[in-house]
Image (cartoon, rainbow, N blue to C red):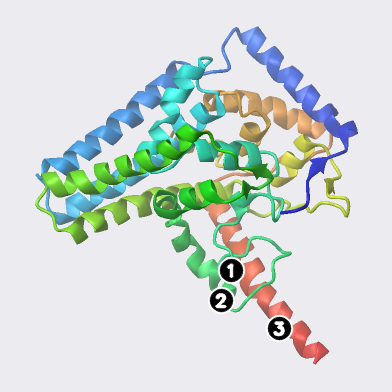
Amino acid sequence: MSQKLKFINTNQSAFFSTARKMVDIYFQEQGISRNANWLMWSKTAFFLVGYVSLYLLILSGNFGTLPLIGLTLALGAFGAFIGFNICHDAIHGSFSKSSKVNKSLSYLFYIIGANPYLWNISHNVVHHTYTNIPGHDEDIEVAPGLIRLDESEKVNKIQRFQHLYAFWLYGLASLSWALRKDYVKFFQKQIGQHRNQHPKREYFNLFFFKLVHYFLFIGVPLLVLDLTWWQAALGFLIMHLAEGTVMGLVFQLAHVVEGTDFPVPNEQGSMEEAWANHQMRTTANFAPKSAVASFFLGGLNRQIEHHLFPKVCHVHYPAISKIIKQTAAEFDLPYIEIESFKAALLSHYRILRKLGKEAYQDQTKTLQLVS
């Protein structure tokens, strides 16, 4: 990637400075911390106890095949919820004022199969800066060649059907992290515009904690339960399919729905608006009034608030969302919000169809006219 991007229109930064000032006033007037409160700690206990309990129930050997599959699916889903609710905030540094607490909680990411060090680079540094910019935001490069989420990418025959198979491929997200993606990102020269220069300890962490994950979820079941190797491998696959499906869907619904933009830089390699304004055009909320979504998704259904204030713990997003929505209206900026999870899914489906089947049909018609 040769082009170095920067946001050049600092005159538009008045929106963010105003929103930040109003959010600061809110926390001062309420006399509360931006970090975890009792609700956040209660959620943390709930998801950790639930995850460990499901794991121990599986290892108990007291269940038949179908209940065991159900427990494994639930374990995978809880892995995603731990990532959303605990690790995500911890890696952003918003869970606690203490860097040691954040660091400790971020290590839970290793347990569910991902690498917190690499996530910090690819998500916190790259994705949060270059959101939805084709060729720079690697979070929208889900399966290059198979899934087209960028209008500048040439459409091919297989992508005609992406609205039918994309949701199934999203289920492979967690498995890819556990077996491939982290290794690839670690050893490539750069992630986005971040040039990789890893501390030596991260080489150890990468391989050691991957082995810990494989041992916990393949080795231990083989040692404790009466399983063949392929049955243990199948359980590992089922767990990660559940984890990946939950993770993949949530991340796509935050940025690839109707109304969100995929801006491109000008010829000089600059984005012609302020960073915060860019976030408002490329990010969407979904199911904002759903207590269930807010509890399980760790605030990721309120991506606008998260992208503007990643250092604020997600339990405060409902309160500050009113401030951000009002400020956006004052500065004539979009505040993209989809009322339900179902509506967001349908919107994403229509995007997949538009960029796949419909784009291919348009391309074919154009070629026929030219010929």
Expressed as whole percent of the image width and height from the top left, the position of residue 95 reads 50, 22
Q: Residue at x 63, y 47 (%)?
A: 190
Q: Give the alpha-carbon distance from disc 2 to disc 3, as whole Å.
A: 14 Å
**Label 2 close to label 1 by CB (< 8 Å):** yes
Query: Quadrant location of residue 26?
Result: top right
Q: Which mark is residue 158?
A: 2
**Quarter of the image that includes the N terminus:** bottom right
Query: Quadrant location of residue 308?
Result: top right
Tally the marks.
3
**Label 1 close to label 3 by CB (< 8 Å):** no
Per the image, the residue denoted by label 1 is: 145
Per the image, the residue denoted by label 3 is: 364
**Label 2 close to label 3 by CB (< 8 Å):** no
Q: Which mark is residue 41?
A: none
Q: Residue at x 50, y 69 (%)?
A: 164
Instruction: Single out the residue that lies furthest toward the bottom.
Output: 371
In the rendered image, the vertical position of residue 128 relative to residue 362, given as above or below: above
Q: Give the alpha-carbon distance from disc 1 to disc 3, as whole Å.
A: 18 Å
Q: What is the three-letter code of the residue carrying label 3?
A: Thr
In the rendered image, the vertical position of residue 264 relative to residue 294, given as above or below: below
Q: Secondary structure at mark 2?
A: helix
Question: Can residue 290 be seen here?
Answer: no
